[in-house]
Image: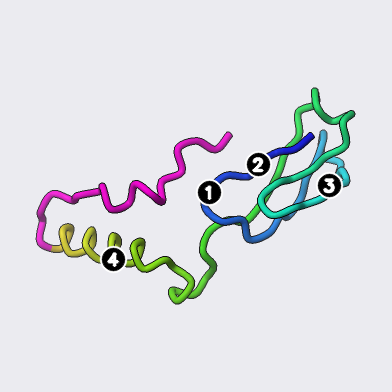
Amino acid sequence: MVIDLPKPPLLRVESVTLKGESIPFHLEERKLILAPHFWDKEIRITYWAGYGEATDNLPPDLKMAVLVAVRCFYDQQPVELSLLKPFRVLRVV
């Protein structure tokens, strides 16, 4: 079973559990690989994702979008969120 972990970038997988018990897994890039007998089971994956803790790790476009949004909030102007669309996570289940 292969599970693609969506954006933002994957930093690390903390745990993969089935009914509170840890289960073995293998990680290749953003793909979590489990043994086939876990396919029809309800598993819980806990992971860290993002760009890291340092602002130097943020993409320049994301930094600019945040600065523009903060400026709009400060000036009490409408915020144009189109700059943030490439970084939006649409669905994480």
**Location of residue 21 (image quadrant):** top right
The residue beneath circle 2 is: 4
What kind of residue is marked 3? Phe
Whole-angstrom CA distance, mark 4 to mark 3, is: 37 Å
Mark 1 surroundings: few (<14), some (14-19) or many (≥20) residues within 10 A: some
The span picked out in magenta is 75-93
Looking at the image, which residue is at 81% across and 27% down? Answer: 39
Q: Which of the two labelled residues, at mark 4 and mark 2, occupies the earlier sequence position?
A: 2
Whole-angstrom CA distance, mark 1 to mark 2, is: 10 Å
Mark 3 surroundings: few (<14), some (14-19) or many (≥20) residues within 10 A: some
What kind of residue is marked 4? Met
Whole-angstrom CA distance, mark 3 to mark 2, is: 13 Å
Dot 4: element? helix
The residue beneath circle 4 is: 64
The residue beneath circle 1 is: 7
Pick the residue in front: 24 or 61.
61
Give the percent coordinates (x, y) of residue 77. Answer: 10, 54
